[in-house]
Image (cartoon, rainbow, N blue to C red):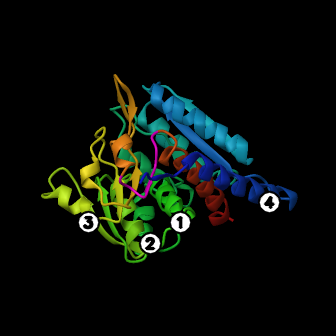
């Protein structure tokens, strides 16, 4: 058998089209388009590419994109003052501070400064609390995109055994929490987990977010399992995910490619969150 490839680009396009339709209705009804403010500090090439892609996604959905590009040596108090202004601006619905920030800036403090109702990344402690409590709020984009991928291929998640490889605050922990909310039996594994291979072999769903190229091998995957690969590892041989794609796809039932799997979903869910933030701020 060979796995069905989950086309993240196609599903992300469907989501963007849904957002575009809703934005069009808002404008036709006399409202304004939702607005996203993106704050980019410094000249990190990867961050600049991400911001460019986010701007393109805003344009394609009718969302207003406002970019604030700042020098890497900006005083922290000036960055805080900008966030405070954006928090108070009724024309701004979502605020995204592109990470990572230059070393001298305190990331956690900057994230906590953002109004939770405008926290489209879902990183604010209040957003995290609402995620854990399963109450209304903005969810982190990559984990939300993973759940949306699973739902759109019509997977019945109830009772499934899920293993999340990775315990980061950005992907691993929130993805595990969202899977729990979908009634999965969820295990978070990491670099110190014992008997990891056997654990994965029992999983119906594997979320690979460990940051090591080709870490998940075919002998770790149960026949017919769903494998969602979050990794983007740039090597001399090219870009690879956290799974040995060529071999794992011979065993799995479904698998996401890298690139073209989870990545496009992250940006699509950012558009969903910006629209949701618009509604929260009404």
| Secondary structure mainly formed by the magenta segment | loop
Evaluate if marks 2 and 4 touch, with contact meaning CB atoms under 8 Å apart: no
CA gap, disc 1 and disc 3: 21 Å
Q: Residue at x 67, y 44 (%)?
A: 58
The disc label shown at residue 157, or none: 2
Viewer-side label of 2, 4: 2
Residue marked by disc 1: 151
Range of residues picked out in magenta: 251-258
**The N terminus - image quarter:** bottom left
Residue marked by disc 3: 202
Looking at the image, tell me whether mark 1 or mark 3 is earlier in sequence order.
1
Q: Residue at x 50, y 46 (%)?
A: 261
Callout 3 secondary element: loop
CA gap, disc 4 and disc 3: 47 Å
Which of the 4 image quadrants contains residue 254? bottom left
Residue 94 location (% of width, % of height): 60, 52
Evaluate if marks 2 and 1 touch, with contact meaning CB atoms under 8 Å apart: yes
Viewer-side label of 1, 4: 1
Looking at the image, tell me whether mark 2 or mark 4 is earlier in sequence order.
4
Q: From the viewer's perspective, is residue 182 above or below residue 149? A: below
């Amino acid at each position: 058998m060979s796995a069905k490839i989950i086309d993240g680009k196609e599903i992300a396009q469907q989501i963007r089209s849904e957002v575009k339709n809703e934005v069009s209705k808002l404008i036709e009804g006399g409202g304004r388009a939702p607005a996203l403010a993106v704050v980019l500090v410094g000249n990190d090439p990867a961050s600049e590419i991400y911001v460019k892609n986010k701007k393109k996604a805003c344009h394609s959905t009718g969302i207003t994109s406002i970019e604030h590009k700042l020098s890497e040596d900006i005083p922290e108090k000036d960055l805080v003052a900008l966030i405070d202004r954006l928090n108070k601006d009724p024309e701004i619905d979502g605020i995204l501070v592109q990470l990572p920030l230059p070393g001298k800036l305190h990331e956690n403090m900057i994230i906590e400064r953002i109004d939770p109702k405008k926290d489209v990344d879902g990183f604010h402690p209040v957003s995290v609390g609402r995620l854990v409590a399963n109450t209304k709020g903005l969810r982190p984009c990559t984990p939300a995109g993973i759940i949306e991928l699973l739902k759109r291929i019509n997977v019945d998640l109830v009772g499934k055994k899920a293993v999340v490889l990775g315990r980061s605050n950005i992907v691993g922990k929130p993805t595990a929490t969202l899977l729990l909310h979908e009634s999965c039996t969820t295990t978070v594994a990491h670099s110190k987990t014992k008997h990891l291979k056997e654990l994965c072999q029992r999983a119906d769903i594997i979320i690979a977010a460990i940051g090591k190229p080709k870490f998940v091998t075919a002998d770790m995957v149960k026949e017919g399992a769903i494998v969602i690969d979050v990794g983007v590892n740039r090597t001399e041989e090219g870009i690879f995910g956290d799974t040995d794609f060529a071999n794992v796809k011979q065993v799995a039932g479904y698998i996401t490619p890298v690139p073209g799997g989870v990545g496009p979903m992250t940006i699509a869910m950012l558009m969903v969150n910006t629209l949701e933030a618009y509604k929260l701020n009404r």
